[in-house]
Image: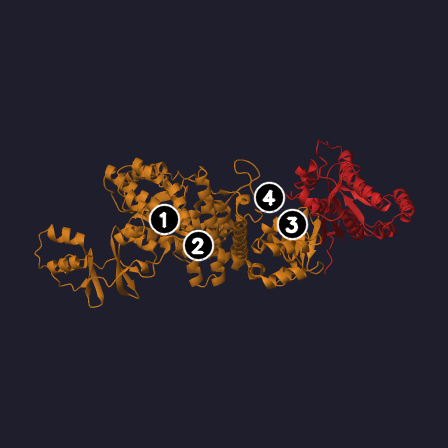
Amino acid sequence: MDWPALLWLGLKRRWWRGRARHPALRRALTAPLPAGDAVNTRYVAVDLETTGLSPERDEIASIGWVAIEQGCILLETARHYRVRLEKDVGQSAIYHQLTDSELQQGEPLPIVLARLLEAIDGSVLIFHNAQLDMGFLNRACRSLWGAPLPVPFEDTMQLESRRLIRQQEGMPAGALRLFQCRRRYGLPDVAAHDALGDAIATAELWLAMNAGGYRECSEQ
Amino acid sequence: MNADPRLPEIQSVASFLRDCLPFGELPEDTRRDTARRIQITYLRKGEQIRASSAAYALRIVRSGAVEIRSEDRQLLDRLGEGESFNIHGLDLGSEGVVAETIEDTLLYQLPRPAYEALRAQFRDFDRHFHSQRNRRLRRAARYRPDTNLLTEPLANLVTRDPLALPPQTHLQEAARAMSERRVSSLLVKDGEQLLGIVTDRDLRSRALARGLPVHTPIRDIMTRDPKRIELDASVFDAVLAMTREGIHHLPVQEGGRVVGIITSSDLMLARENDPVYLVQHLSRQQDTESLAAITASLPSLMVQAVRGGMRAHQLSRVLTAISDAATCRLIELATEKLGPAPVPFCWLGFGSQGRGEQLIGADQDNGLLIDNRATTNDMDWFHRLATFVCDGLNACGYPYCNGKVMATTERWRQPLGEWRRTVDDWTHAPTPEAVMRVSIFFDLRSIYGDAHLCDQLQQHMLARTRRDTIFQAALAANVLEQTPPLGIFRRFLVERNGEHRDEFDVKKRGVLPIVDLARIHALAHGLPAVNTRERLQQLVDARILTIGDGRNLQDAYDTIQQIRVENQCRQVTAGHHASNYLNPDELPDLERKHLKDAFTVVHDAQEAMRSHFRQGL
């Protein structure tokens, strides 16, 4: 993040901090912003499954995330929550292979969201297509707790898009989909397709995009 | 989705682990827990991991490739997707082992506590990482579910307490005893000593047909000093001995004492429809076409035999016996046509036939060794013999030799004296190129005719090779040129284009280096064996190789041959010709691992030889 963007983000956070009605959200907006040193920054890769593409009309169906510390994805931090839906699933259930009754077993959105906010405390988020997922998260926080979620994030899809444009490579349809991007970095295909699987796949892509010197996973 | 969101099932990782050795054998829920303990890193090509700086962890290659090298940069191992290493464990024996990514690599790390907990809890898991490479290989070579009767010990089929009578017994008495016992043969014994054997056929052709009186002693019609077999031999050995000698009864001995008898019908009852019986069948054919009709069925017989559990080294003995039989029959057919041989001679088999290691698709390597008394006219007869036999072999599916190592070539069809001079030429001023051309000559065996000629030539050859260090060095240089394709698990050491893209020649790169190693040591020490396994055994017996090295090489040889044979079976089953090309990606994980272990053994042995024969280089 460049400094004007960081400054703007800082201002937004201060503005909303006082208006947030939930302690977890307030904490998320109070945590110091990362210093910008990639190795020491903690990242959390997040993926949402939603019932559609509109944050206004559609709902979050599940959330998966996993943290990256010191350039190392820690699967111990992986979480996967199903969200209890208010409305029915509609068309996208076919795609996500979830049924209404399964989703009724999920937990209420406020609980899941609070868990996510605890987990991301002070971290930079990573998404593949942040616009969509952040749209849903902002909308959910705002309607539940009176403030959106102005937190720093990175978007592997945007990064890849910029790279392809810079290198003047063609961008055929579907070129920016997560698994197409992974292939260009020599990452393996994975069969599983759920929020957590995609969050981990995104985290790996992020590592591949930012691979530098050898990074050591700390001993436990 | 897991019921507890804080302990989610990480499907992609767990299902990857299922396909990795040795995680695949862990219980499902253990694997699921293990997946949650994994830490993922991504390394660019050319980065290094050392025990001195890296965290203690088991590292699993998720994608990409890693090389393990010793401190002096020797390649120890090359790992691909699904293979794992513990840099600290590798470092124990030798300081300074380093793992280096040779491609961009996604690495899964299992931290020390989780890794050690698994090793403590699961014995097989622990053994996988604990056991040395050689031990892993040995198990692979030795342990196979064995359903093949041919490999069973003879002991189960032997008739104990066979009918035995003293030599002065009258014919009629003997016949009566045989009828009473319902047996087709009797042993002629003087006390404990076996003098001979009398069979139904002997009673018919040697007694009745000649009108011998009924009180003639059986000593007069017995076959004296019959061929015997040891009790601990396999059924296979017995079948082979019978078909070779054309006999049906074999006294069985243990510690020099006859303890029983085995007959061909005992064996037939136990096993029918076996490739071994082809040997007999071949010797009854009346022309080349009918021989070829039989040998055409060899590929499918190979598949049958291997499916039945026959091991590669047994199969190669059977296939060699079959090609020997075809050769012998062709020589007999030629003699019927050309008239009898003017002087004694010996038909020589070289290369894989000489070593008794033939498989499907081997080309012919042969020669003629002729008595020194042969005149120019006589030599003409041998030329015609060679043409008939080599053409016949070609028709039977043993194609002409590219290098012209055939009896039809003048250089490979000579009287003994000329042969000796030729050997002198080869060993005296060797060029590597010449050595390569003739190296298969040193694996020679008498196939037909006067074996004594072959012995003389072999003795002369061994006397020369044994003392000539320059020749040994030339041979060694040649051997070292062909190294195993140690990188085969990735793309780089397979063929890059052409018909055999992504494959490598497992015979040339895997089998022949071991054959070459065994040969050069055998020649340097004057050992007469030509079969690779026997050579290795003699080298161990003579304390030229350590027991460990000898065994490792033999295991490596067996493993590679087995994988080669199974590959050929797959090719034949898929309707292709059997070839020696193999695509390592198509091998099951475990076989790939064993093949790699075997290549590593070959590599080590080559390195040892490099220094051993260096003085002459």
> Which chain shows up in orange?
B
Q: CA distance from mark 2 to mark 3?
A: 32 Å
- Lower sequence index among marks 1 and 2: 2
- The amino acid type of the residue labelled 2 equals Pro
Q: Which residue is mark 1?
A: B318
**CB under 8 Å between discs 2 and 3:** no
Q: Which residue is mark 2?
A: B145
- Lower sequence index among marks 3 and 1: 3
Residue B179, numbered label: none
Secondary structure of residue under mark 3: helix
Mark 2 and mark 3 on one chain: yes
- The amino acid type of the residue labelled 3 equals Val
Residue B13, numbered label: 3
Q: In the rendered image, which quarter contains the C terminus of chain A?
A: bottom right
Taking the image as shown, residue B51 lies to the left or right of residue B454, namely right
> Which chain is home to disc 3?
B
Q: Which residue is mark 4?
A: B492
